[in-house]
Image: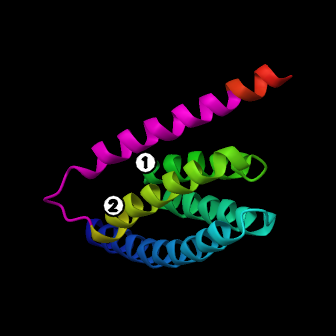
Amino acid sequence: MGSNLHTLTEQLNASFRVECRERLEQIADALQSCQEHPERNGCWNALHQELDSLANAARMIDDSDTEGLSRAVATLIRQARNNPQQQHHTLELLIQTMTNIRAHCLEQSDADKTFPVRYVTLFHDVLRDLTKTADSSSSRR
């Protein structure tokens, strides 16, 4: 039974890596579109959807770090859609996020334990930006 569980876990992880790779490719395409045409809501919606889907896939393999980071950045993307002053910085954070997710989910070896530290640092930056955005929205009301 232990062997079957291990095999199932490996199959789920392999499926997640395939899905992660596909989602990151879709995010890269939508990111390029947003950089070229930030006024188009469709590219921002696509980014949000892909990040949300990546978070759901990460949940399936119990990768709470990737899930949380993806959801937080998806929220920033949704906010940046209608805030031109926030868009450039948010896209920069997205590039950092994609790089870290790619390394964590697709390239990580068991010997390299620095990825959680990078995730925590990036997650802190994203949460700081979410807080700033929420504070500025409150002060405008």
125 lies above or below 89: above
Secondary structure state at the residue bearing disc 2: helix
Dot 2: within a 10 Å radius of its alpha carbon, few (fewer than 14), some, or many (20 or more) residues? Answer: many
In the image, residue 54 lies at what x, y percent? 56, 63
* Labelled disc at residue 99: none
Q: Quadrant of the N terminus?
A: bottom left
What residue is drawn where x is 59% and y is 59%? Answer: 56
Q: Amino acid at mark 1?
A: Asp
Callout 2–callout 1 Cβ contact below 8 Å: yes
What residue is drawn where x is 45% and y is 41%? Answer: 123
Q: Nearer the viewer, residue 104 or 62?
A: 104
Q: Residue 103: which quarter of the image?
A: bottom left
Q: Nearer the viewer, residue 102 or 131?
A: 131
Task: Tell me where the magenta segment starts and ends, as one range.
Answer: 108-134
* Labelled disc at residue 104: 2
- Specify whether residue 111 is painted magenta: yes
140 lies above or below 121: above
Residue position marked by numbered label 1 in the rendering: 65
In the image, residue 64 lies at what x, y percent? 46, 48
100 lies above or below 122: below
The answer to whether 118 appears left or right of 22 in the picture is left
Secondary structure state at the residue bearing disc 1: helix
List the single residue furthest toward the left. 111
